[in-house]
Amino acid sequence: MGDDSRGHVSRDSVTATLKALSLPDNRTGLEGTTKAHLDFLLLSLETLSDEGSEVMLAAAASLGLSGTIGDRVTLWRLRNANPLRKSSGGRKKVDVDEVRALVMVVCYLAREQHAHIRTTIERLEDCFSKEISPLKEPLIADYLDAFHTAYRERMVDGERKTNKDISERALSLLVELLYYGSRFGPMRLWTSLVTRPEMQLPDIPEDSVQENDIANNVPVEERVESPPPAAREVGANSDVSRPPNG
């Protein structure tokens, strides 16, 4: 994504990037894994910044994508296409143009929050190097606490996942976002989505899926070849759980 000295996004750059986000020949659509992962990335951004749908809609407007993501109900429907959402009983399908728009929004927000994301990851790496729990670092603990709360409230497997599992997902998403906020972020994220294997959905009890009224459920709310050290450490660290008062 190109921008000028004031941080405004070039619409020509956005258009060119969108055209470059094409499906490989062996793909005819984008499945549940894509919808889930985009929602998880937005959840990570949301819980890191404590900002929700209005910021995401403002990003879409800055990118000239209000025709695709123009209001909170549309955004809510797109995010709830995630098959792991408790409220995914409504809309199931997201078309390719909508996925492209979500990719651009994720990368735009990741770029805006780049300094915050980098600082959080640097502190995470510092905790690992000193062999202390990341939960002793307030910036990390606050993020994990917010992510845990949102994940358990919104996802069908939220109550069955361990604290360690949720924390590892939260930290891995944060590491991804560091790179999606770079110049090549949209293409990097798109490539990750279209090459990601289809997810194995958990067995979901019927009463855990909520098909509630939309009005009551809309939320208030470059280039590196190898992953950073934090990405390699997240899965190996056994002391990343949830803050005890979370």
Image (tube, rainbow, N blue to C red):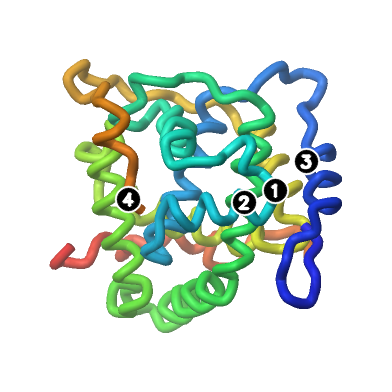
Task: State the residue in front, 29 or 226.
Answer: 29
Q: Identify the image quadrant of residue 132.
A: bottom left
Q: Nearer the viewer, mark 1 or mark 3?
A: 1
Mark 2 = which residue?
A: 61
Q: Residue at x 71, y 55 (%)?
A: 185
Camera-nearest label, 2 or 4: 2
First reached walking from the N terminus: tag 4 or tag 1: 1
Q: Amino acid at mark 3?
A: Leu
Q: Residues within 10 Å of mark 1 (few under 14, many from 20)?
A: some
Do residues under tags 3 and 4 come within 8 Å of each other at their CB atoms? no
Q: Which residue is mark 1?
A: 64
Q: Which of pointers 3 and 4 lies earlier in the amino acid sequence?
A: 3
Specify the quadrant of the image occupied by residue 85.
top left
Q: Quadrant of residue 44?
A: bottom left
Mark drawn on residue 169: none
Viewport quadrant of the N terminus: bottom right
Mark 3–mark 4 Cα distance, whole angstroms, equals: 28 Å
Q: Which residue is mark 3?
A: 18
Is residue 143 visible in the rendered structure shown here?
Answer: yes
Q: Which residue is mark 4?
A: 220
Residue 235 in sight from this viewpoint: no
Task: Report the Cα–Cα distance between label 2 and label 3.
Answer: 15 Å
Structural distance between the alpha carbons of marks 2 and 4: 18 Å
Q: Position of residue 149 (x, y in %)?
A: 24, 53
Looking at the picture, which amino acid does disc 1 mark?
Gly
